[in-house]
Structures are given as C-alpha cells and as structure tokens.
Image (cartoon, rainbow, N blue to C red):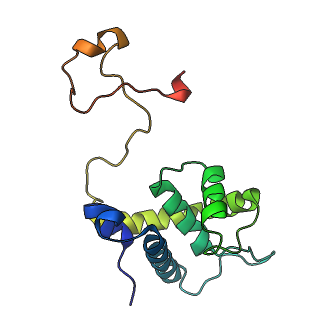
Amino acid sequence: MTNPNPILSLRKQGYQGKGMSLEEFIITTYCWVDDVLTDLLKRRRLRQRGIKPSLSDSEVITMELIGEFQGLDADTAIWKYFKEHWKAYFPGIGSRSQFAKQAANLWAIKQQLQKQVTAELGTINDPIHVVDGFPLPVSHFKRARNCRRFKEEAEYGYCASKG
C-alpha cells in the first residue's frame, strides 16, 4: 500500500495547517517519493555501472521537493540547508557537486513524478500549466501609487534577470 501523497494533502492546508511538523513532512514526502519511484522503475536499475551514489535517488528527489517547498531554488541552497539542518536524516550527503550531478541526472524521473502529481491533483486538463517566475509589470513605477489594477494583489517587485 502506498503512502498518501503529501502534495495532495498540502494542497488544502499546508503541512503546518495539518498539524504536521517539518520533520514529519520530510518523512512523509520521502516515503511517497520512494513508493512512487519503486512503482515507476518496476525493478529496473537506473545505473548500469559506475560507483553507487552515497544518497539514494529518493533522498535526492525528496531534498529537492522539500527545498523547493521551503523556497530554496538553487541546488547550492538546498544542499547547504540539508547539510546544516538535516544531516542526521541524510547521512550520506556528500559534496555539493555530487548532489547537483545526481539531481541533474534524475530529470526524466522528476518529469514522471510531476506527471503523476498532476494526474492525482486532477490538473492535467487545466488550461493553465505554466506560471511565470518573475514579476509582471501592471503599471509604470511612477504611476503605481494611483493605479487601480490589481490593487489588492500587486506589489512593488524586482527581477534580478531583468535588471
């Protein structure tokens, strides 16, 4: 029996709203990722040769999911966070470059996980699938104070990539 999808349970209340500590959320997410990964691979091995990584693929994907949920976007930030705060849960955590390479090599598996999550959430037929990650201007900076569009939602934003 597979564990309940933590993503589905968080959709409504968030892990804090469910009375779930971050520790429980990490464990639940790991169990879900490991179960789904086992179902996806169906006893096939991802690596045919080479040195076995110190972290399991389930651990790396869990770290990335939790890191993204915490607002950490870069591999470096995720690795540093788990190295400093959760080393007891991920004792095999090695160098940052090793973590980044392993995470990058799992892109096809992460796509399959994303497909499964969208299917379980029922958003596969949703007309909107992409959300921008940078602020969209709704008014010129000088006129922002008097602008009536999106008064409740809009804020002053900054996008480092746009200058």
- x, y percent for residue 76: 66, 51
Total marks shown come to: 0
Q: Quadrant of residue 69?
A: bottom left
**Horizontal placement of 149 versus 162: left or right?**
left
Residue lying furthest right: 50
What residue is shown at x 65% (from left), y 58% (from top)?
79
Residue lying furthest bottom: 1
Pick the quarter of the image with the N terminus.
bottom left
**Horizontal placement of 97 versus 123: left or right?**
right
- x, y percent for residue 120: 31, 70
Q: Quadrant of residue 63?
A: bottom right
Residue lying furthest top: 142
What residue is shown at x 49% (from left), y 28% (from top)?
159
What residue is shown at x 34% (from left), y 9% (from top)?
142
- x, y percent for residue 34: 52, 79
Res 47 visible: yes
**Horizontal placement of 105 versus 62: left or right?**
right
Q: Is residue 134 above or below residue 26?
A: above
**Horizontal placement of 60 versus 10: left or right?**
right
Q: Is residue 55 above or below residue 157?
A: below
Res 119 visible: no
What residue is shown at x 29% (from left), y 64% (from top)?
17
Name the residue nearer the viewer: 77 or 108.
77
Residue lying furthest left: 148
Pick the quarter of the image with the C terminus.
top right
Name the residue nearer the viewer: 70 or 102.
70
Q: Is residue 128 above or below residue 97?
A: above
Name the residue nearer the viewer: 81 or 160.
81
Q: Is residue 145 above or below residue 43?
A: above
- x, y percent for residue 125: 26, 57
